[in-house]
Amino acid sequence: MEQVCFDLPKLDQKATRKKVLKVLRIAREYKQVGFVRKTIQTTPSYALREHGNTYAISKQVEDVGIWNVDRETVMKKAYEAVQLSLPRLYEKERQIIVRRYLEREDVCDLEIYTALHMSERKYYRMKLQAFNKLAYMLRIEVIG
């Protein structure tokens, strides 16, 4: 009987990291603040306009309403996806992600790996593994 080996495709680490950081930033923002709605400007701003008539109709209320609904949905989905993914990580990986990217205080890596009693090298290795796992779980990995 022959052994079957499945190799995962190589990730583009830089692009994947950017995407995971973006999702974590959105999740942190939603967790801390919730969603802040855009409002329309009710007082007209009187500014000299030098161009001719465009005959375009301003749909400011519509545009703001659509943005509010869409943005809130995106933020809520990102937060829920991160919350579902975190328990699947190993304990140390989860602690790294939560302490570094999801808590209120902005702490540096040095403080975290010191508090977790890890060497710097092991910390960065586990952080990379956590990012890769999150990318696969959130389905935002970039194959490169």
Image (spheres, rainbow, N blue to C red):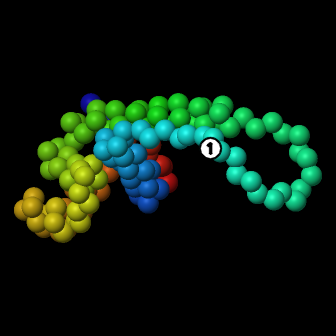
**Residue 7 visible in rendering:** no
Percent coordinates x, y for residue 127 in the rendering: 25, 56
Q: Is residue 39 visible?
A: yes
Residue at figure coordinates x 23%, y 57% from the top left: 105
Q: How many marks?
A: 1
Residue at (36, 46) in percent of width and height: 29
Q: Amino acid at mark 1?
A: Gln
Query: Which residue extends farthest right?
Result: 52
The percent coordinates of residue 26 (x first, y second) are 40, 45
Q: What residue would you read off at disc 1?
A: 41
Residue 75 horizontal/vertical position (percent): 43, 38
| In the image, residue 3 above or below residue 142 | above
The answer to whether residue 73 is left or right of residue 45 is left
Circle 1 sits in a helix, a strand or a loop, which is it? loop
Depth check: 75 or 96 in front? Answer: 75
* Residue at image location 34% in from the left, 43% down from the top: 33
**90 or 9: which is nearer to us?**
90
